Image (spheres, coloured by chain):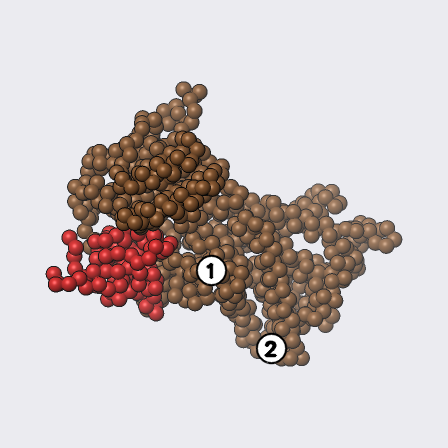
Chain colours: A brown, B red
Amino acid sequence: MTAEKPITIALVGNPNVGKTTLFNALSGLRQHTANYPGVTVEIKKASVNHKGRQIDLLDLPGAYSLAARSPDELIPTQILLGLHCVECRPDVVVAVVDATNLERNLYLVHQALEVDLPLILCLTMVDMAEASGAHIRLDLLSERLGCQVVAVQPVKGKGIEQLLDKVLEFQEKPLPVPMVWPEELITETKRISGLCKTGTPDFMVRRALFDKDGEAAKDLIMENRAIADALILARKNLADIGFVLPQAESIHRYADIRVRISGVQNSPKGNRNWTDRLDAWLTHPVAGTLFFLLAMFLVFESVFWLAAPAMEWMSSVHEILADWILATLPQGPFTDLLANGIVQGVGGVLVFLPQICILFTMLAILEDTGYMARAAFLVDNLMSRCGLSGKSFIPLLSSLACAVPGILSTRVIEDRRDRLATILVAPLMSCSARLPVYTLVVAACFAPALGHSPWLGGVVLFAMYMLGLILAPLAALLLKKTLLRGPTPLFVLELPRYQIPNWKSVLHKVMDAAWSFVGRAGSTILAAMVLIWAMLYFPSTDENGKSYPKEIRELREAEKGEEALVLQAKWRENSFLGTTGKAMEPIFRPLGWDWRLSVAAIASFPAREVVVGTLAQLYAQEEEEENLVQALQGTDSPLTPASGLSLMVFFALCCQCVSTLVVIGRETKSWLWPLFTFTYMTTLAYAGAWIAFQLGTWIWG
Amino acid sequence: MQAFPSFCSLDQLLPGETAWVHHVDGTDDLSQRLCDLGLQQGVEVELLGKAPWGDPIRLRVGNWRLGLRRREAARILLQKFSPR
């Protein structure tokens, strides 16, 4: 038995039919996400053992048609036609179909029935169809379509065994061709087949004919350039007899589907259901907008407030761990690296894990209930004015918490230019990592204790958030008018039925996001932190060859704390990072910064939250914010209201986040776009900070 | 039944009004997408509501719900009597 080759099955179906829920029910937690170079969309894979036979599962992105219109839809087309760069054609196709919407769902099935693969039709939401009075005769449907039909209820685990049984049973059964095409189409197909290499199946030629510039056409033309002209001629001949492509395909298929399903179900009534009643409120121009604002407010409140205890706990854990390492392990560069570089650095980033988990839970719930589509519907008008569509809204909003999940959630956007524009402006939104910087500077420069109005701090903080909220849409508009110019993308948005989210599917999404975040913290951020640490630690001897750490330790032991701090400051100043900062000082002087602020800003390029710790170290204070605030308020401090403002604006606009750049690189599959983001944001940040400094000098002198 | 067919485009439908698809205009991506989604002759559509500023609009197409921009909806031509 074990010697038998595993069976690969591919799950295909329209979006929102419960395909992923079925996949989760089939695979349990044994799944992983496959990422291919050059492809922006991921394929989920899993293996299960059924009756001693290994079955490999592929969960393909949802699609309405094999005539692919988005990067998502390309995947099922490529895999079913055997044109995917990595995955082979599956042995069996499992077509997942929403029983409440049989006609439209069967369109993709109708196309898939032609590709010469065993197909099992898997009906979901049969209970819901029955409840609305539409009884479906499975045996008749199976007979009419010439394929096996199984009804499943993935959430309850019903029908799963039966489905796997059918996979084993029918994996080698040949399929009848379900559709009689017009004689002329058959003639044209044969003529083009003659130009193709022998063995090219008819369905490939037909898809090449149907989809101008589609995957099948590209593949055939690559073999023989003459096919390009032959396809054009064939399409023209067909149009002459009234078979006008591309519509003719859908007209013929839908006509055939209607004949085949007549009598299979008593016609479902298109009556108003509770989704419509809910939508009357939730998409209402006034009530719906108010609810939308309330929902978004609650999501972000929960991200900040629910996460706070967990974040405090995590940050105290890594503080304790760092202290314990410093106290226990023998003194030396390695211990310092472990405590200050790795534990403090990576820990400082991992602190954001609770926020990421909560944000993703909220977003997964919004998505799985079906509300996300309504949110996109409500804001589409507003977003279209800056050249984007409603689908860009959630990614931008998520970026207020963190640009990384924000960028990941752009995958729902079909249009490449729209998606790219959204990705490129998302880092402009003020993420939660900027908040510590803002609070520190506000406390140090705009505190009421310094004679400022008690309102000023809040106003400055609000202004920093508004900066991103205003500049991101403007930048998107500019990008859409220049680099990413193109036709207005389609906004064809299915509004799925509202449903109670399935906690397993929510958990899967949250775990995926959490793992990829931890993975990044363990790789990129770790490397950056080690580098920053090394640049602050070395050279660790002064001009006379005396070791700084040794001297500081001796001073501390002699209870000369003050002198130890002075020496520490000197060490930082003479470190590689310190000398770099001093060399860079002229560049940052127009912004009102001294070498210490310059160093802090440079050190924060890998991750902006590094700035607080860096400033603390540079000012040779204990790493407690109150002390740091006092030091920054001190007379020798370079931080005036004007330079403070310029520092905040710089941090608000600069892409000081390696994770974001790495994610942009990963999602756009190019190093050009992260480079572009970094360049434009740094330029913008420098210009903005300069303006802020001039403005600040003018206001506060 | 009226003596002559009365056509209108989908963006001219009033909220709560029902009509039947006659055809989708054009041969571009948009019209192909709408055809693939089953906006075929004889399919019943109803305007359910509108977003703020009246755009996009919310429709019932047969037994499912679709959001469309008005400009896109203008491509769908309707007849106001049942074809069946």
Disc 2 chain ID = A
Disc 1 chain ID = A
Amino acid under disc 1: Gly
Disc 2 versus disc 1: nearer the observer: 1
Q: Which residue is mark 2?
A: A452
**Label 2: few (<14), some or many (≥20) within 10 Å?**
few
Q: Is residue A165 visible?
A: no
Residue B48 against residue A112 in the figure, above or below: below
Tell me if A248 is positioned left or right of A2 in this view.
Answer: left
**Separation (CA) of disc 2 from disc 1:** 49 Å
Q: Secondary structure at mark 2?
A: loop
Residue that appears at 63% across and 69% down: A687
Residue that appears at 27% across and 36% down: A178
Residue A387 against residue A364 in the figure, above or below: below
Of mark 2 and mark 1, the one earlier in the sequence is 2
Residue that appears at 22% across and 33% down: A143
Q: Secondary structure at mark 1?
A: loop
Q: Which residue is mark 1?
A: A486
The C terminus of chain A, quarter of image: bottom right
Residue B34: x and y, percent? 32, 54
- Number of residue marks: 2
Amino acid under disc 2: His
